[in-house]
Amino acid sequence: MLVVSYDMANDKLRNSFAKMLIKNGALRLQYSVFEVNNTRRVQEILKTKIEADFAKRFEGGDSVFICETNEKNDQIR
């Protein structure tokens, strides 16, 4: 499972980023925090999309935090 959290100043970029996460199976936990509970392959594709499609559009104060959890932690809620 991945937890993706972001902070972006540009409204258009932020909305586009959130829509991309949702389109790729992410579940919104809070306004800018998403859970991606999908196959390892889909998670890797998602990380690649973020790097290839969004990283070059980030501004100086923008940030994306991706946290991978292990299977043992996924069972604790």
Image (cartoon, grey):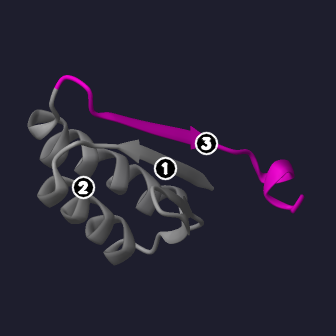
- Per the image, label 3 sits on a secondary structure element best described as strand
Q: Position of residue 65 (x, y in %)?
A: 46, 37
| Residue pictured at 10% horizontal, 39% vertical | 57
Observer-nearest of 45 and 14: 14
- The residue sitting at 19% across, 36% down in the picture is 55
Q: Residue at x 27, y 33 (%)?
A: 62
Locate residue 29: give its quadrant: bottom right
In this orientation, which residue lies closer to the viewer: 45 or 9? 9
* Magenta span of residues: 60-77
Q: Residue at x 74, y 45 (%)?
A: 70
Cβ atoms under marks 2 and 3 closer than 8 Å? no
Which comes before the other along the chain, label 1 or label 2? 1
Question: Which residue in the protein does label 3 denote?
Answer: 68
What amino acid is found at the position of numbered circle 3 in the picture? Glu
Q: Earlier in the sequence, mark 3 or mark 1?
A: 1
Please tell me how crowded label 1 is: few (under 14), some (14-19), or many (20+) other residues with Cα within 10 Å: many
Label 2, residues with CA under 10 Å away: few <14, some 14-19, many ≥20: some
State the count of labels.
3
Please say whether residue 37 is one of the residues in the magenta stretch: no
C-alpha separation, residue under disc 2 versus residue under disc 3: 21 Å
Corner quadrant of residue 39: bottom right
Q: Amino acid at mark 2?
A: Arg
Q: CA distance from mark 1 to mark 2?
A: 13 Å
Q: Circle 1 sits on which residue?
A: 4
Question: In front of the other: label 1 or label 2?
Answer: 2
Please tell me which residue lies in front, 46 or 7. 7
Indicate left or right for 45 with 2 as reference: left
Q: Nearer the viewer, mark 3 or mark 1?
A: 1
Q: Report the disc number at residue 14.
A: 2
Give above or below for 75 relative to 69: below
